[in-house]
Image (tube, coloured by chain):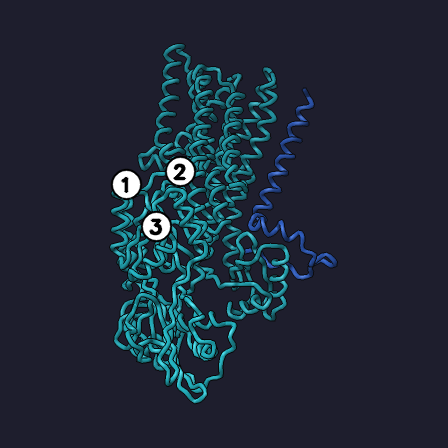
Chain colours: A cyan, B blue
Amino acid sequence: MADLTASAGYQPRLGACPACDAAPLAQRLADRAEAERPASLILSLPGAHCALCITDVERALTNHPGVRGARVNLTLRRVTIDAPGLTAEDLVPVLARIGYEAHELDPQALSATTADRAGRDLLMRIGVSGFAMMNIMILSVAVWSGAEAATRDLFHWISGAIALPTVAFAGQPFFASAWASLRARRLGMDVPISLALVLASAISVFETVHSGHHAYFDAAVMLCFFLLIGRYLDHRTRAIARSAAAELTALEVPRATLLREGAEEVVAVADLRPGDLIRVRPGGRIPADGVVAEGASEIDRALLTGETMPMPAAPGLALSAGEVNLTGPLVLRVTAAGQDSSLARLTALVEAAESARGRYTSLAERAARGYSPAVHLLAFSSFLGWFWATGDLRLAVNIAAAVLIITCPCALGLAVPAVATAASGRLFRRGLLIKDGTALERLAEVDTVVFDKTGTLTMGQPRLVDAGAIPPDLRPVARALAEASSHPLSRALAEALAETPPAVLDQLTEQPGHGVSGCWQGRVVRLGRGDWLGAPDCDNAATLSSWLGIEGQPPLRLDFTDRLRPGAEDCVADLHADGRRVILLSGDRAAPVAALARQLGITEWHAGVGPTEKAEHVGRLAEAGARVLMVGDGLNDTAALARAHASISPASALDAARVASDMVLTGQDLAPVAEALVIARRATRRIRENFAISFGYNVLAVPIALAGFATPLIAALAMSTSSITVTLNALRLSGKTR
Amino acid sequence: MEILTILIPVSLGLGAAGLGAFIWALRNCQFEDPKGDSQRVLSDRWDDHPRQDPPPSRD
């Protein structure tokens, strides 16, 4: 970039523009501020939305002893706290007391400063080119309305003095990217832009020196201004998505409890080594692959296999990172951590699947691919044609420059970013975060939607089928037993019986892997696995079940089903109504999958599908010509998510699944998935419309330029009207009506 | 036409003043939290007396 501006001779002029001095200065200031930044905490505040929230949060935090200052950023929904010596654990309860949910964010994982600086840099260039454009326009209007001779020359000279440094400064992003694409022997959209900027400036200088009639200084600066706005919109959409995605990652600060010579120590998961002993509390996620060394418990493998039924764990059993320990504390000997863990092995699978998907060429890339050579050819042939016809070099170069300016992709550069900003902003408000730039276009092409079951269509949380099955006199006992355990079935039972007052039980003990027992009015009562209670034919695995036993009575079977995710029914119904093929692929057993498919009206379902088979299934669908949208949350879905044409995962999904997917559902509701397909299709239609509009303007204006009638006035009119039409068309998307 | 010698510098000066203000605002990080700033004006916390301690630096 630097050598290009220097070779163009613009470097000495840089001092004339205040912003050129300001840009490096601002960067130095920012660097210094970063070095001197006090130890600060960043908390995410998903619930903050108004002026009252800002005041409440800031007042509560500044009144807390030890806090020197707090400032809420409502745009990012974060609060930065300057509190040396305090940790997030001290301050999260302070906010919880006044009713605000807060999560610790890892400041290192956010690292938003570089993105911010790039955005500020673009804004500065927009400001400078906007200033220059307005001033040159004032002068140009005078020229267009008939300023003559010396006045016109004076105005051209002043315009040039403003325009040249502006183009040199504000055009840098285009020059840099054009230079990069030329070095890679490609013709990107930025090559004709840069050529138009340089040629328009050069021909205008030449005309001014020779007291010519037409100078294109205003066109060059206007081109910079409009295109920079497109660049900035593009940058902002990406930055918001990136920071939200980084926030999801920063939310999970991965830690493990390491046992070292009998003492417990909390360390980062990255510091674990094979052979270390770690303790996993009931309810905790297993941080690394390992073998159970002591303890007995039950393990929820839903995220890895899709299986809803918890599995008993005893010493010697191998566990994988990502599983959830349910009932009893476990001590694990780490067998693999970090790069060797099953998570990392899965990442390799994901990479293989991604390369099978191939690189998607976005609409803008396809347009640029056809467009750039056409523009160059057009300009060059008009130059040759006019030079051959008239022999006038000056006229021929003038006309070639006019053609380049008229065809310059102002509208093209604005068409895609404006639509993407409007669409992704709308989806973000509905709870869908777009991580990938081309995801919207790929989503629009989807005709087949593949769902995972556990954790995607269902919440992965069981629910009691029928509370009436428990005799009323036993309900207090059942509630008391259920409350003694953190097993998901117990919690579901306690929730179902929330209206019943619990009975008073003695000797409540939990036998990890089996159940809970207690003493009620002198009789032993138990809640747990059928074989532990000696229940007849307890092997029936069709549904999730637990047994309630009272001494002296046959045990009572309690059936549970997995809870549907809110919006799942509407989502599937909408997809069917839209004419998409809906498929259910689950790693769970056939009976619960069939029941769910029947409930949602999905006719095509497969149960017991492993991780590799899921990816293969998606691959086969793709080979048959289907454009597949994969919606899944587990490790077993990760490869399929990467293989599919587009993919969505809920925020509750494992990190690996979220990384592999293009979009993340930030809320619990599944309904935005169906809506996203509609919005994506409309966005793509808008992009195509915008291409058509700017193409239409070119069809009208290019013959005028080729014929040599394009004055700077016509160029300015064509450029601004097409840019404004395209932006207005894009903004129609963010309207309230469906 | 002599009026131009006054008008053009004046118009350029006004424009440059606006640009300077924009750059100053940009460097003071005033575009970091547009949504928050639009809401903060509604808060009556500092209506009766101005804030004594300097506000903490923005992130």
Question: For mark 3, what is the residue?
Answer: A630
Q: Earlier in the sequence, mark 2 or mark 1?
A: 2
Task: Report x, y in % for residue A365.
Answer: 37, 36
Tag 2's secondary structure?
A: helix
Q: Tell me, yes or no, whether the two marked residues, 2 and 3, touch with CB atoms within 8 Å.
A: no
Task: Report x, y in % for residue A640.
Answer: 30, 52
Amino acid type, mark 2: Ser
For the point 38% across and 85% down, which residue is it? A551
Question: For mark 2, what is the residue?
Answer: A177
The chain under label 3 reads A
**C-alpha gap between disc 2 and disc 1:** 36 Å
Amino acid type, mark 1: Gly
Depth check, mark 2 against mark 1: the one in front is 1
Residue A275 visible: no
Q: Label 1: how many residues lie within 10 Å, few (<14), some (14-19) or many (20+)?
A: few
Q: Label 3: how many residues lie within 10 Å, few (<14), some (14-19) or many (20+)?
A: many
For the point 32% across and 48% down, which residue is it? A644
Amino acid type, mark 3: Met
Q: Nearer the viewer, residue A171 or A160?
A: A171
Label at residue A625: 1
Q: Give the vertical position of A267 relative to A46 (above or below).
A: below
Which quadrant of the structure image shows residue B54? Answer: bottom right
Residue A402 visible: yes
